[in-house]
Amino acid sequence: MNNQEIVAKLWNEANVLRDDGITYQDYVTELTYILFLKMSKEQGQEDDIPEKYRWDSLVEKDGLELKNFYRQLLIDLGNPEIVKNNKINLIYSNASTSIDEPANLEKIIKDIDELDWFSAREEGLGALYEGLLEKNASETKSGAGQYFTPRVLINVMVKLMKPQVGERLNDPAAGTFGFMIAANQYLRDQTDDYFDLTDDQQKFEIEEAFSGMELVPTTHRLAMMNEYLHGMDGRLELGDSLSANGKWMKDYDLVLTNPPFGTKKGGERATRDDLTFETSNKQLNFLQTIYNSLKKNGKARAAVVVPDNVLFADGVGEKIRKDLLNKCNLHTILRLPTGIFYAQGVQTNVLFFTRGESDKENTKETWIYDMRNNMRSFGKRSPLNDKDFTDFIEKYQADDMSKRQEDYDSQSNPNGRWRKFTIDEIMARPNTSLDISWMTEESDEEDKSLSEILVEMNEKSITISAAIAELTDILEGIDDSEE
């Protein structure tokens, strides 16, 4: 049994909990409390868990005794006076359960115990948990999509940013910590799972290299679990990055993030006093926070997902764009397809930029890649895949601009996906807008006369009428059988 099959079995347990009124949104949290104990046993990491609350003690109980025992377990594991491990305390902080029926709790525990954990260990328990989070995000009923960036996009951003050993990375809108998990895996792949590093280097990667902050407590809990299962122990705070509590995030070599969209409730401004421009627009505040958090060494860099309005918003939006263009080299914009996020209809981009050594005139030209027009349709059943990014990655990574240049000539190749705009061209645009589109939709349909079109429409109409008649007969048969 592989991890995908195990994830499917775990997800089916949600059906057990419906009778207890537990929503999809709460299901993964409920499951996390139980999985933590099982996975700690599988990884041999039960030392910091009181013996009476370890997996073997849990699985041997049943009925009302199990229900009462489990509820006390949740309280005690979040108590630092009982458990002297801060990670465990945070995972179980203010934990409670909505599982009211003892038989349901017992079934879930026993079903989890009987899964193929040998195979799960072989593939990685962290990968298993990531699969569960991805499954949760793909279910529109769960509402978790807003915290989840498609893994293929995360991996592309990490690959192009090339994290290096010894660098400090951050995600100020951590979600379930997906960007930092992917960056950690990228470095492990480069260093034989860190065995190529010295002891001090390994310690740095595990404890200091990856950090983040997440506002939503339930999402932060999932992020903590995700970090723990991937053998990471970096700083992952619960709080608002746009408040004074986020001011610790400074001097990073690399930021990878997908900040939340929208405005703050009530329209209030961010409470940080180190942002140059005040606005209630969260993504504009996050953008300021990100580029100001990079080291001013000409090497620190970021890849950030932003909605289209960041590229064209007037007023303070234009001021922030000009500030970004001055302080950083905004060298590439990737216009993403619609339909790839679970908030349907939101049009997004990835900004790739490098912080300059000074705060002036760092952007000389910006390349834009249009992955939005003349693309296949994307959605839950047709998600992004690696092949969709092949052309972009190849030309982004080119040693010189020659490969992009082949796709650049606006006259001989008007629908080429790459276009270059100098800083003078950008500054001359109304509103200093970076929302630039040049591609036109292509059609493979041949020109037809009006009579041909009418004949085709009539043929389709006949086909539809026949299908409706057939469906009507079927439904009448069903109604008759019910009587």
Image (cartoon, rainbow, N blue to C red):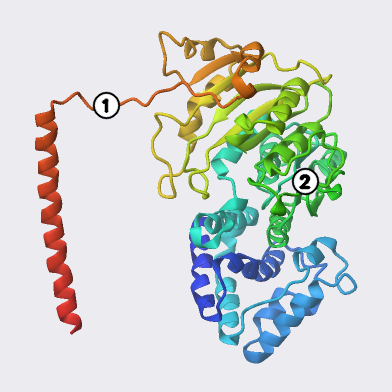
Residue 13 visible in image: no
Q: CA distance from mark 2 to mark 1?
A: 49 Å
Q: Position of residue 78 (x, y in %)?
A: 81, 71
What's the residue type where badge 2 is placed? Answer: Arg
Q: Nearer the viewer, mark 2 or mark 1?
A: 2
Badge 1 density bin: few <14, some 14–19, many ≥20, Cα 10 Å:
few
In the rendered image, the vertical position of residue 202 relative to residue 401, given as above or below:
below
Q: Quadrant of residue 329?
A: top right
Mark 1 lies on residue = 444
Q: Position of residue 378 (x, y in %)?
A: 43, 42
Q: Position of residue 46 (x, y in %)?
A: 77, 67
Which residue lies at the image location 56% right of the left edge and 70% below the top edge? 23
Left or right: residue 35 versus residue 19 is right
Q: Residue furthest right?
A: 81
Residue 317 visible in image: yes
Q: Position of residue 66 (x, y in %)?
A: 67, 86
Left or right: residue 225 versus residue 348 is right
In the rendered image, the vertical position of residue 46 relative to residue 140, given as above or below:
below
The local secondary structure at tag 2 comes to loop
Badge 2 density bin: few <14, some 14–19, many ≥20, Cα 10 Å:
some
Mark 2 lies on residue = 269
Among numbered discs 2 and 1, the one appearing first in the sequence: 2
What's the residue type where badge 1 is placed? Answer: Asp
